[in-house]
Amino acid sequence: MNDIQTRQDIEAVLTQFYTQAFADPSIGPFFTTVVPLDLDTHLPLIADFWESVVLGSRVYAKNVMEVHRQIHNIEPIRTDHLDRWVTLFTATVSKLFDGPKAELMKQRARSVATLMNMKLNHPQIGTQ
């Protein structure tokens, strides 16, 4: 198995992940009902984010936390939702790629979920 090397590799991960995520009973409703996701619009943006994280490009300029805070205000994103997202996401990466960049992508996914959980569900931690 090859490591992640290109944006197309990242897009392959995202395409397969979202296919599973949309159908998932736990997190699927966030993508289909809470804030219906148009993949034609969303995939290029999230690919920009992951390309920045994994390949070191500087193509993502939005605030990923703010987007999720807005979703959380509509429907709470709980710890179990984030855990499920990590499980699906890291399994997808592992199914398609192996190597340092694939490991980085999985590690960063776990970090993003942890940070998001802290900021959304435990905001008092940062204020003490």
Image (spheres, helix red, strand yellow):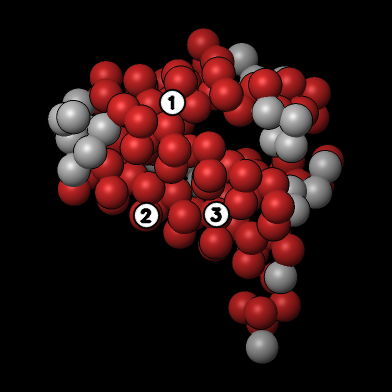
Question: Going from the N terminus, do you reach mark 3 or mark 1 first?
Answer: 1
Q: Disc 2 marks which residue?
A: 107
Q: Is residue 72 above or below residue 33?
A: below
Q: CA distance from mark 2 to mark 1?
A: 16 Å
Q: Nearer the viewer, residue 41 or 109?
A: 109
Q: Horizontal and vertical percent for residue 100?
A: 18, 48
> Disc 2, disc 1: CB below 8 Å?
no
Q: Residues within 10 Å of mark 2 (few under 14, many from 20)?
A: few
Disc nearer the start of the sequence (2/1): 1
Compared to residue 34, the image places residue 15 above or below, namely: above
Mark 1, residue position: 14
Q: Residue furthest right?
A: 74
**Residue drawn 27% across the image and 42% down it:** 102
What numbered label is drawn on residue 113? 3
**Residue at (51, 11) in percent of width and height:** 40
- Residue 11, given in percent of the width and then of the height, sits at 36, 22
**SS type, badge 2:** helix
Q: CA distance from mark 3 to mark 1?
A: 16 Å
Q: Could you tell me which residue is drawn at 37 percent across and 48 percent down?
A: 106
Front-most of residues 12 and 98: 98
| Amino acid found under the numbered disc labelled 2 | Gln
Can I make out residue 31 in this image?
A: no
Identified by mark 1, the residue type is Leu
> What amino acid is found at the position of numbered circle 3 in the picture?
Ala
Left or right of 67, for residue 87 = left
Image quadrant occupied by the N terminus: top left
